[in-house]
């Protein structure tokens, strides 16, 4: 397998799926719809939709059921980015190499666009029921996937992590607080993406638990890598301002432990996640390569 070529093709397909669920920009609310679409169409790696599709395929599931969830996860993820960029939070002007939503559409419309994407995400995921017909097993699988989506994106997951991040903004953090923020704000969506695809395929609970563990380690490593890149990369490489953590006086793994120890932690988490992949009942060389790519990325 040529990983880069496969990743390019799966990214193209995931982008196509996600964009197929976006609303038409028409009617009295078309400015809101335009802001929502602008945010999603800004691009990105589409990693979470790719993970959903990959684990669904790996466990032999119906990929048609995965598509609404692929779009839903990307919408909800984008909602979090739109709100993260707001002046009340990180106040960033660039995301994915272009102006952020609040810069283009104004702060109030950006808030509404984020809200709209969050709501549309759940609405889109629920459309998977229309693909189940009278198949009771598929209905149960979609219900399980919806439960995971709601938990990992809500107060027990992403939003819970964001709340502590906002509450302690500019304050020194303990390692325990930082770990909570990382595992919830970033890791929860990766955990959820790996679990949702497998749940749609009917994977047993022990497999979902193992995928959750893998996602937690990958999410932590992903965020620590992000901290490292904020110090060592450039705007041209990563598509957003570097040094924003220092500008916003944010405590990160790098500010606590330094770059060398941060790199060592990334390696430890990576090795643990990849070892756990070997204990899954199903195997996908692409997924293993994808997880390693996320952890080792340079942008």
Image: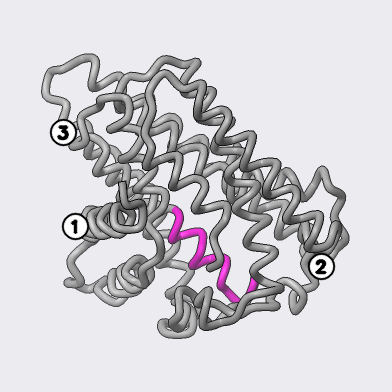
Look at the numbered disc 3 and give the secondary structure of its residue. Answer: helix
The colour scheme applied to this rendered structure is: one colour
Look at the numbered disc 1 and give the secondary structure of its residue. Answer: helix
Residue wearing tag 2: 170
Crowd around label 1: few <14 · some 14–19 · many ≥20 (10 Å): few
Magenta-highlighted residues = 77-90
CA gap between label 1 and label 2 equals 40 Å
Residue wearing tag 3: 130
Q: Residue at x 62, y 76 (%)?
A: 233
Of marks 1 and 2, which one's residue comes earlier in the chain? 1
Where is 17 relative to 27, above or below?
A: above
Depth-wise, is mark 1 or mark 3 nearer the camera?
1
| Quadrant in the rendering for residue 30 | bottom left
Q: Residue 155: percent from the left, percent from the top?
A: 59, 41
Of marks 2 and 3, which one's residue comes earlier in the chain? 3
Residue closer to the observer: 135 or 298: 298
CA gap between label 1 and label 3 equals 16 Å
Residue wearing tag 1: 20
Q: Residue 174: percent from the left, percent from the top?
A: 87, 50
**CB under 8 Å between discs 1 and 2:** no
Q: Residue at x 43, y 82 (%)?
A: 98
Q: Residue at x 80, y 59 (%)?
A: 260
Q: Residue 241: percent from the left, percent from the top?
A: 60, 80
């Amino acid at each position: 397998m040529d990983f880069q070529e496969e990743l390019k093709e799966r990214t193209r397909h995931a982008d196509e799926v996600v964009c197929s669920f976006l609303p038409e920009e028409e009617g009295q609310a078309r400015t809101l719809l335009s802001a929502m679409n602008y945010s999603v169409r800004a691009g990105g790696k589409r990693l979470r939709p790719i993970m959903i599709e990959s684990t669904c395929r790996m466990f032999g599931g119906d990929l048609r059921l995965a598509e609404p969830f692929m779009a839903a996860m990307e919408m909800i993820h984008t909602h979090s980015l739109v709100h993260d960029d707001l002046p009340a939070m990180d106040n960033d002007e660039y995301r994915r190499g272009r102006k952020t939503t609040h810069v283009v559409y104004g702060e109030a419309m950006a808030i509404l666009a984020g809200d709209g994407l969050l709501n549309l995400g759940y609405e889109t995921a629920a459309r998977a029921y229309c693909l189940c017909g009278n198949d009771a097993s598929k209905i149960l699988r979609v219900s399980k996937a919806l439960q995971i989506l709601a938990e990992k994106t809500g107060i027990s997951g992403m939003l819970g992590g964001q709340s502590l991040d906002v509450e302690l903004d500019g304050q020194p953090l303990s390692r325990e607080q930082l770990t909570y923020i990382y595992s919830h704000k970033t890791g929860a969506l990766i955990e959820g993406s790996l679990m949702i695809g497998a749940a749609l395929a009917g994977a047993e609970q022990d497999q979902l638990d193992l995928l959750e563990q893998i996602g937690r380690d990958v999410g932590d490593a992903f965020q620590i890598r992000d901290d490292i890149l904020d110090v060592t990369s450039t705007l041209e490489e990563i598509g957003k301002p570097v040094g924003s953590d220092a500008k916003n006086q944010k405590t990160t793994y790098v500010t606590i432990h330094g770059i060398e120890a941060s790199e060592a932690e990334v390696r430890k988490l990576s090795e643990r996640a990849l070892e756990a992949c070997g204990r899954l009942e199903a195997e996908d060389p692409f997924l293993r390569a994808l997880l390693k790519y996320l952890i080792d990325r340079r942008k």
